Image: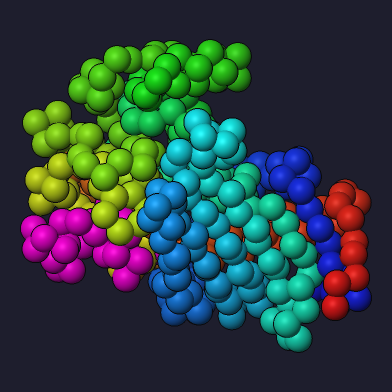
Amino acid sequence: MTVTLETLLLTDYEVKAVLSISDVMKVVEQAFIAKSLGKAQVPPKTYLFYHKYGGDLRVMPSYIEEHDISAVKIVNSHPENRTKYNLPTVMAIVVLVDPRNGFPLSIMSGKTLTDMRTGAAGGIAAKYLARKDSKIVALIGAGAQARTQLASLLEVYKKFEEVRVWGLYGTSEEFVAEMRPKYGNLCKLIPVKSVREAIKGADIVVTTTPSRQPLVMNDMVSNGMHFNCIGADAPGKEELDPAILKRAKIVVDDWEQASHGGEINVPISQGIITKESVWAEIGEIIAGLKPGREKPDEITLFTSSGLAVQDAVTAKLVYEKALEKGIGMFVKIT
């Protein structure tokens, strides 16, 4: 990285202008490998809980020593934001830091960055864990994350026969209306009225809700399914019946974070499953240290708690592309 005397400020509009899901998936895959090979410093998220407002704030620092990339993200989650304040559920700021001297190279919006790096993780997980002949996708939740999850799955599979979408308050219909012009030639998008209707016969199930009680029940699940569990990203959140986890090959992004805030956090705290129930980290599978899917009838499950290294590599990607395109505003803040 070139040391500058000014910091590049980037709005969310500018971040969105330079990112593609294919590029983000490439760098996130490398970040997962670096993490699992012990070539990155990734402390667990630090949480502040705003209980009376039903939200929380997380701080996520990381340093990928192998690639000399470091960043810190501050990100919130307030599920009632849209209805109460007309604000996004998730907002974030990312500071990209020069590891040589601590200089803030860039301060950028982390909203689209977070959406896309999380979506990328789902596509990567499906690449290694879902069946290659997967044809039907169930999206449980129809918000911002459902959009990037679908984009990353289509990046891997190119097309599907059906994508069934379930969401509250008419969001599934809105999602389908928005996505049909973009993806209608790649998949048949179908809004459905229930979680059960979405999941029946699905090959890949993606859960992206902030639920604190199971939405997907064990009797809905067939052998051979793959789950991307995205919504459970804080203590107490869960979207799946814990009995499903007892049937599944469980893969996490990070054991410590997942055990405290991922899909496995409630079953772990209740003693339903243990650390020994977890097969691998996704980075171990990508690096070839452990196999991913081994049999067609396996139930595989990826629980994404969201790693700071994903933010760091994506922020570096944004920074480099913004410099190339002359996007953003430089300010002297130090």
From which residue to which does the magenta span run?
256-285
Q: Is residue 275 magenta?
A: yes
Q: Is residue 286 left or right of residue 215?
A: right
Q: Residue at x 49, y 60 (%)?
A: 57
Residue 240 place in picture, x, y as percent = 21, 42
Q: Is residue 299 left or right of residue 234?
A: left
Give the residue furthest to the front.
Answer: 52
Residue closer to the observer: 315 or 50: 50
Residue 271 place in picture, x, y as percent = 9, 63
* Quadrant hosting residue 170: top left
* Quadrant hosting residue 63: bottom right
Q: For the C terminus, which image quadrant?
A: bottom right
Residue closer to the observer: 129 or 184: 184
- Residue 280's place in the image compared with 98, above or below, is above
Q: Is residue 282 magenta?
A: yes
Residue 59 place in picture, x, y as percent = 52, 67
| Snapshot colouring | rainbow
Q: Is residue 42 left or right of residue 94?
A: left
Q: For the N terminus, which image quadrant?
A: bottom right
- Residue 206 visible in this rendered orientation of the protein: yes
